[in-house]
Image: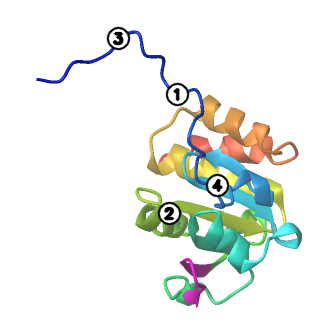
């Protein structure tokens, strides 16, 4: 039978923790909109490698493109990860139709359950408004909460338009 010495003091030197070399989404300048959904302006978009290293698996670009090709990703592979890039035709307030918001929702649902998604575009108000419309129309969030969240992310001149669109039942 072995006897334990209770008076023995434990070793005070802690083993060195392995250095965490993974980059976080915050460290590459991405702004968190909600859980697993980040956004950044197109001109501040980090490199593909940095985005992949930050744990994101998809990028959705709000740009002028062919609306029919929104489901076809451009796949970029790096040593550590694979990044899918989609283009969605949203460049102005009139593009925030229910169809485009449903397309955005479809792309987000493919990834947000298991990884992070980045949305990028030229106008922060369009990015935040599109995400707020998604929450209101498709996720059943209250109108005031959607507008409040959009305001936190820079929606000011589109606030009334966003509110009016959220009033329209889906």
Which mark is first along the chain, 2 or 4? 4
Rounded to the nearest angstrom, the CA distance separating label 4 from label 3 is 33 Å
Task: Compare residues 108 and 25 and report the one nearer the observer.
Answer: 25
Work out whether 108 lies above or below 77. above
Q: Main secondary structure of the magenta part?
A: strand
Q: What's the colour scheme?
A: rainbow
Rounded to the nearest angstrom, the CA distance separating label 1 from label 4 is 22 Å
Indicate whether residue 76 is drawn in magenta: yes
Question: Which stretch appears magenta?
Answer: 74-86
- Left/right placement of residue 50 relative to residue 112 reads right
Assess disc 2: are there few (<14), some (14-19) or many (≥20) residues with their C-alpha within 10 Å of its C-alpha.
many
Q: Which residue is mark 3?
A: 6
Residue positioned most to the left: 1
Q: Which residue is mark 1?
A: 11
Q: Position of residue 147 (x, y in %)?
A: 69, 37
Q: Which residue is mark 4?
A: 19
Which mark is first along the chain, 1 or 3? 3
Residue 127: image quadrant is bottom right
């Amino acid at each position: 039978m072995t006897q334990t010495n209770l008076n023995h003091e434990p070793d005070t030197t802690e083993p060195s923790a392995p250095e965490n070399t993974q980059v976080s989404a915050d460290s590459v300048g991405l702004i968190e909109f909600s859980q697993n959904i980040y956004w950044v302006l197109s001109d501040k978009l980090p490199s593909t490698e940095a985005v992949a290293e930050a744990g994101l698996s998809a990028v959705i670009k709000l740009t002028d493109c062919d609306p029919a090709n929104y489901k076809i990703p451009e796949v970029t592979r790096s040593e550590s990860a694979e990044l899918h890039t989609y283009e969605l035709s949203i460049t102005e307030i009139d593009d925030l139709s229910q169809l485009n918001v449903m397309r955005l929702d479809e792309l987000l649902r493919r990834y947000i359950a298991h990884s992070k998604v980045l949305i990028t575009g030229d106008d922060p108000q369009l990015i935040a408004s599109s995400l707020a419309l998604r929450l209101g129309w498709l996720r059943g969030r209250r109108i005031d909460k959607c507008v409040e969240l959009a305001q936190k992310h820079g929606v000011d001149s589109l606030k009334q338009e966003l509110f009016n669109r959220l009033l329209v039942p889906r």
